[in-house]
Amino acid sequence: MIYGATGYTGGLIAEWARQHALRPVLGGRDAMRLGALAERLGLEQRVAALSDPERLREALRGIRVVLHAAGPFSQTSRPMVEACLHAGAHYLDISAEVDAIEALVQRDAEARGRGIMIMPGVGFDVVPSDCLAAHVAGRLRKPRRLALGIRGLTFATRGSAKTLAEYAGRDVKVRRNGTIIGVPPGSLERSFDFGDGARASLGVGWGDVSSAYFTTGVPDVEVYFEATPVMRGMLTASRYFGGVLRTGPWQAMLQTWADLLPDGPSEEQRAMVGTVIVAEAEGPSGQRACARLRAPEAYTVASMTAPTIAARVLTGDLEVGFQTPARVYGANFVLGLPGISREDVE
């Protein structure tokens, strides 16, 4: 089941799955929109709200894998995981939220007891960056530090904007000595070479801060976005006006603003841009390994990675408990997808 199939990313995932001989059940809470999508793709639909546990459990009857695409995951992952544990269905999601991923780490023992896998981050975050992190970490003996730089996150859907609004004014999450801590927004800055020389980049609280630790064992993890004027402005506002942005009225206004955004970019818009990820690992004696990965636009990547992993889980290619993509499927997994390439950087 693809739950949240009527959302922008969920719809892309459903279309890609259908085009590649998969026949997922479409799930969601909006019967009218779900019905229209199911009719267009020729797929089964099941309507259930996350706020209705009994109906949700009924909707998962006979489902072996749930691909959860309805964020913000800070609010939606728990009820879906509860339903998956009850139904014995493997749980996948496309979350980029550090706190939501960390909450799923705590369900590891329950998942093992039920014989199911819980794997968040099967979209753009964290599949390509997780694979790249595993690659550079594997080139060093006992790496201590990992830094990821990301360029090209040009577009934001309504769902992504709502998540950004929810986290406005909060500290940026990083991992130090194996523990996740918060630092002030805009306080971390360094350079990455995305292929055209060093470019300033700013620290962000991205899902790899959680997942890369479980994939690589590296105790210090930081994630950066290229410091575009928009990104620098957002982090500056978050740092100096965070207290105001976290208040109820401002949160309501930010959520309303997110609702006014278009669903997401068109296929033509997505085809015009790409993404670049750089991973740098450092060993205890200062030795370094660096690699660069080029990929299509982020939502395009998610539309491929998520159903590809779901298809592998359906064949039994999985490990029970809490897992991360590269931990189970390896550093080279992402290289099997169209338009993605990797190069080592000296």
Image (cartoon, helix red, strand yellow):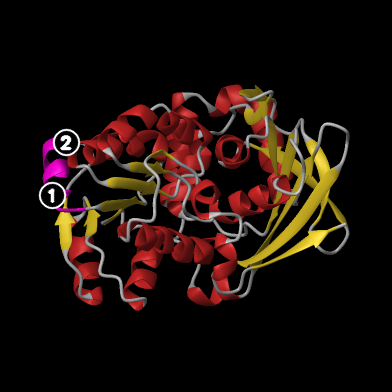
**The residue under label 1 is which amino acid type?**
Arg
Image position, residue 216 (x, y; %): 63, 40
Give the mark nearer the N terminus: 2 vs 1. Answer: 2
Magenta residue span: 54-63
Q: Count residues near mark 1 (Cα–Cα under 10 Å), then give few for <14, some for 14-19, many for 20+.
A: some
Screen quadrant of the C terminus: bottom right
Residue 86 appears in the figure: yes
- Which residue sits at x=47%, y=36%? 101
Q: Which residue is mark 2?
A: 53
Q: Which residue is mark 1?
A: 61
- Determine whether 94 is above or below 305 in the image: above
Screen quadrant of the N terminus: bottom left
- Which residue sits at x=36%, y=34%? 75
Q: Is residue 231 left or right of 24 when viewed as pictured?
A: right
Q: Secondary structure at mark 2?
A: helix
Residue 56 among those drawn in magenta: yes
- Report the predominant secondary structure element of the magenta stretch: helix
Image position, residue 154 (x, y; %): 62, 59
Residue 53 among those drawn in magenta: no
Q: Is residue 143 left or right of 104 when viewed as pictured?
A: right
Check the image and name the residue furthest to the front. 141
Q: Nearer the viewer, residue 218 or 208?
A: 218
**Which mark lies nearer to you, 2 or 1?**
1
Residue 319's image quarter? top left
- Which residue sits at x=75%, y=49%? 139
